[in-house]
């Protein structure tokens, strides 16, 4: 798939912006603080209905304005999609697909599939588990709407279980009342975990081959799911139910649920060494690149067409050889790349833009 047009109104530092993209490489050159990241943020926002930068949606409104608007036209293998999004001052938003308002945010998933890569994404490899869970959750949601709805239901039940843990003073009473939540929670948890296992297994395969390529066979990468699970969904459900009850006393004391998919993680090793704790900065960067390239391949396989690659200022982090090799690898998919300078010649279908203080010229 590829984006044909982007229209922004009162979005961050864009008062009004109207651009037509090429179907391959699109390079946006600009100095610092001109609106490069803002542009990519708007595309990501239209893709999953959330900003990668902020949870406060009204942050994206041009200062002093009451509403922001993103309008993106996507060309796919078999059809076209127009995504229209309005963000209002009270953090509310409305989304239309082909001019029809959607009722649930899940309906947006899969309409515009992107892989987002900025220097900040190294957090995937380096930081606490919640960044990796967020990564998994966003990616699986983009290829599987049901997964997104499972997450919402899980969160709801988890909140209710935690509320009960907080409000119940007597352990014996808690033991009797919590089982209805545990049964529901373990049922949904096992479905979520099965989908995550499937995702991580596939991602691991793609990552292995990509990483061998970019390290010239020197490094072996491995991604594995860290959590409570068994072979089958039924066994996993049973296991989680048992673990919930084994940990009840602990949960009672801490007043929140300590096991389940909301606590799980992905373990990443290079040559059997845990990259999070023992990898060098360079290795961590390269691993992030591998994961992004693996994501591209996985999405392509799962949705039957290429996703769109958003690259925010990451080229400058690679040496010249790796830059060239990287550009070669992504030459067939629509890429929206920002940088402060781009020293390479463009192909016929490629386009170069200049970003200056919230306006864009070809
Ligand atoms: N809600 C907003 N309204 C107006 N300007 C904003 C808003 N949010 C951020 N900005 C401004 O946008 C500018 C460009 O940001 P950014 O896209 O991150 O720059 P860069 O080109 O370095 O990636 C910054 O100067 C920032 O002050
Ligand atoms: Mg930036």
Image (cartoon, helix red, strand yellow):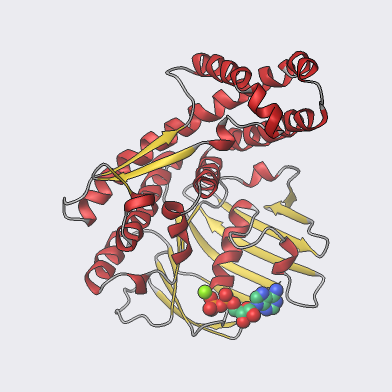
Residue 84: percent from left, percent from top: 69, 59
Q: Is residue 235 left or right of residue 247?
A: left
The residue depicted at 53 percent of the width and 17 percent of the height is 239
Residue 268: percent from left, percent from top: 36, 44
The residue depicted at 37 percent of the width and 41 percent of the height is 203
Say if 245 sits above or below 151 in the image: above
**Most foreground residue, 207 or 23:** 207
Residue 291: percent from left, percent from top: 37, 51
Say if 318 sits above or below 74 in the image: below
Image label count: 0
Query: Is residue 266 in sight in this rendering?
Result: yes
Quadrant of residue 43 in the image? bottom right
Say if 45 sits above or below 181 in the image: below
Residue 145: percent from left, percent from top: 59, 37
The residue depicted at 21 percent of the width and 56 percent of the height is 215
Say if 162 sits above or below 283 in the image: above
**Most foreground residue, 288 or 10:** 288
Query: Is residue 14 in sight in this rendering?
Result: no
Given the current orientation, which residue lies at the most extreme left position? 217
């Amino acid at each position: 798939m590829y984006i044909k047009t982007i229209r922004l109104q009162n979005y961050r530092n864009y008062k009004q912006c109207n651009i037509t993209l090429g179907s391959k490489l699109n390079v946006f050159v600009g100095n610092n603080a001109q609106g490069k990241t803002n542009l990519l943020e708007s595309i990501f926002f239209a893709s999953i209905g959330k900003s990668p930068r902020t949870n406060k949606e009204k942050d994206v409104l041009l200062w002093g304005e009451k509403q922001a608007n993103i309008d993106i036209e996507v060309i796919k293998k078999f059809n076209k999609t127009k995504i229209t999004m309005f963000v209002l001052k009270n953090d509310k938003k409305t989304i239309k697909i082909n001019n029809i308002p959607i009722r649930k945010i899940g309906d947006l998933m899969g309409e515009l599939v992107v892989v987002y890569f900025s220097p900040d994404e190294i957090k995937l490899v380096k930081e606490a588990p919640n960044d990796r869970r967020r990564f998994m959750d966003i990616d699986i949601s983009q290829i599987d709407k049901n997964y997104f709805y499972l997450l919402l239901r899980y969160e709801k039940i988890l909140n209710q279980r935690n509320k009960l843990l907080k409000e119940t003073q007597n352990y014996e009473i808690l033991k009797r009342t919590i089982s209805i939540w545990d049964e529901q929670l373990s049922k949904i948890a096992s479905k979520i975990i099965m989908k995550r296992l499937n995702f991580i297994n596939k991602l691991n395969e793609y990552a292995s081959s990509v990483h061998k390529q970019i390290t010239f066979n020197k490094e072996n990468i491995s991604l594995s799911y860290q959590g409570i699970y068994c072979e089958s969904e039924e066994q996993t459900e049973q296991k989680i139910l048992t673990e919930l009850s084994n940990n009840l006393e602990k949960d009672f004391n801490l007043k929140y649920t300590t096991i389940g998919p909301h606590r799980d993680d992905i373990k990443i090793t290079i040559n059997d060494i845990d990259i999070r704790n023992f990898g060098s900065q360079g290795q961590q960067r390269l691993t992030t690149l591998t994961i992004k390239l693996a994501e591209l391949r996985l999405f392509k396989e799962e949705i039957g067409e290429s996703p769109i690659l958003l690259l925010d200022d990451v080229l400058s982090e690679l040496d010249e050889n790796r830059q060239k090799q990287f550009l070669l690898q992504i030459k067939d998919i629509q890429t929206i790349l920002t940088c402060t300078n781009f020293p390479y010649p463009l192909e016929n279908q490629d386009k170069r833009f200049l970003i200056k203080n919230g306006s864009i010229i070809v």
